[in-house]
Image (cartoon, rainbow, N blue to C red):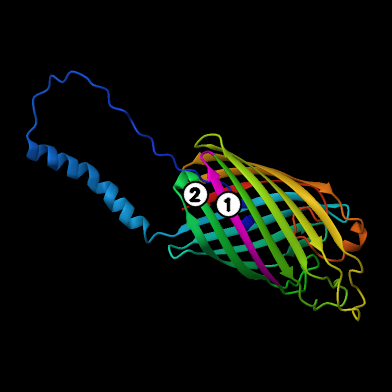
Amino acid sequence: MKKSFQKIIPSVLFALSLNAHALVDYSEPVSESQSNKMTTKAQSPRQESKSSLIWKSDFSLTTNYEAIEINNQKAGVLNFNTHVQTPFNVYFDLSYWQAQTKIGSQSGNPKFILGFNWLRFGSPSEEARLDIYGGARMKGSSELASSRTDKIFGVETTKRFGTFGLGLGYDITMTGTPKKENDMSLGNIHRIAVSGGWMVSNDIQFEVELENFKINPAKDQSRPVRLSEAASFSTLSPKLNLTIVPAVNLEMGARFRTNKPKNEGQLSQAKLFDLHGAYSNSLFAGLNFNI
C-alpha cells in the first residue's frame, strides 16, 4: 500500500493573512473607478485558478529503489506507484515492482486499486476523510512473483490537525488459487495500518507507519504446498520527504520488522514480496513527482 504510504501523508495547505497596520498615506487620492479596476484586475487570476482546479485531476508518480534480502540473499527492488485523483471523488492506484537478483531480473505482480472518497468534510487544515477501495493483484510469471490472482478490499480514514495528521486503515486480501504447483496456497491476508505525519515546513515532511499482517492457513487441504498454521508479523516504517524543486520530492525511508513470524521458513515459498517487511528489514530511496 505505497498506495497506503502516499495516501496518508498529510498535505497541509496554509493560507497566510497579512495584517495591515495604519500608516500615514501621502500619495495622491485614487478615484473610485480606478480603484475598482485595480481590484478586479488583481482578483481575476485567483478566480480563474479556482475555476480551472475544478476539472483538474491530481496525479503522482513514485519510483524508489529498495534493498532487501530474499532467502538470505541480497536483492534490489525497483518499485513503481501511480496515484490519480479525479474531481468526482474517485481515485486510481497502480503499482508494480521489478527485482534484480543473482539469477537475473524478476518481474513482479501488477496491482490495481479503485477507490472512492466516501466522506470528506472540514477545512483543508482540519480535513477528515473516509475512503473505501477495492482492487486486484494480478498473477506473475517470474520465480519471485506469485502465480495467484488476489482480490483486495479495504477502508481507510485520515484526519488533519494543522501541521499534523493521523491515519488508520484496514484491508483484506482474498487470495486465489496458485497456478503453479510449487507455489504455496494461503488463506486470506489481513492488514491493519496506523500512520502519523508532521509537516515540518513546506520543504520537509516526516511520516511513520506501523503495519500488522496476519496470514490465515490455507483452506484447500488438497494442495501439496500449503500454509498449515496462521502467521503474523509487524513492521515500522519511518519516511522523510524533501522537496527538491516544485512538484518533485526526494523520498527516503526504512522498514523494520518489529516481530517476525514463527514459521518464517515456511513463508519463503508463499511469495509475499508485496507485503512490506515479509522477509527482511529494508532501506529505500526514490523520487515522487506531483502534477
Residue 254 in the image: above or below residue 144:
above
CA separation, marks 2 and 1?
A: 8 Å
Looking at numbered disc 2 in the image, what kind of residue is underneath it?
A: Glu
Would residue 7 be visible to someone looking at this image? no
Give yes or no for contact between labels 2 and 1 (Cβ–Cβ under 8 Å): yes
Within the magenta stretch, is there residue 153?
yes
> Which label is found at residue 127?
2
Residue 22 in the image: above or below residue 47:
above
Q: Quadrant of the N terminus?
A: bottom right
User: Mark 2 or mark 1: which comes first in sequence?
Assistant: 2
| Picture quadrant of residue 156 | bottom right
Q: Where in the figure is residue 55, as x and y percent of width and height?
A: 37, 61
Q: Residue furthest bottom?
A: 222
Q: Magenta part of the protein: which range?
A: 151-163
Give the main secondary structure of the magenta stretch: strand
Which residue does the numbered mark 1 point to in the structure image? 158
Q: Residue at x 82, y 64 (%)?
A: 215
| Picture quadrant of residue 103 | bottom right
Q: Where in the figure is residue 226, as x and y percent of width and height?
A: 89, 72
Q: Residue at x 73, y 52 (%)?
A: 211
Name the one closer to the observer, 145 or 259: 259
Q: Where in the figure is residue 5, as x and y percent of width and height?
A: 63, 51
Residue 241 in the image: above or below residue 106:
above
Q: Where in the figure is residue 116, as x and y percent of width and height?
A: 53, 65
Q: Residues within 10 Å of mark 1 (few under 14, many from 20)?
A: many
Q: Secondary structure at mark 2?
A: loop
Looking at numbered disc 1 in the image, what kind of residue is underneath it?
A: Thr
Within the magenta stretch, is there residue 271?
no
Q: Residue at x 86, y 73 (%)?
A: 218
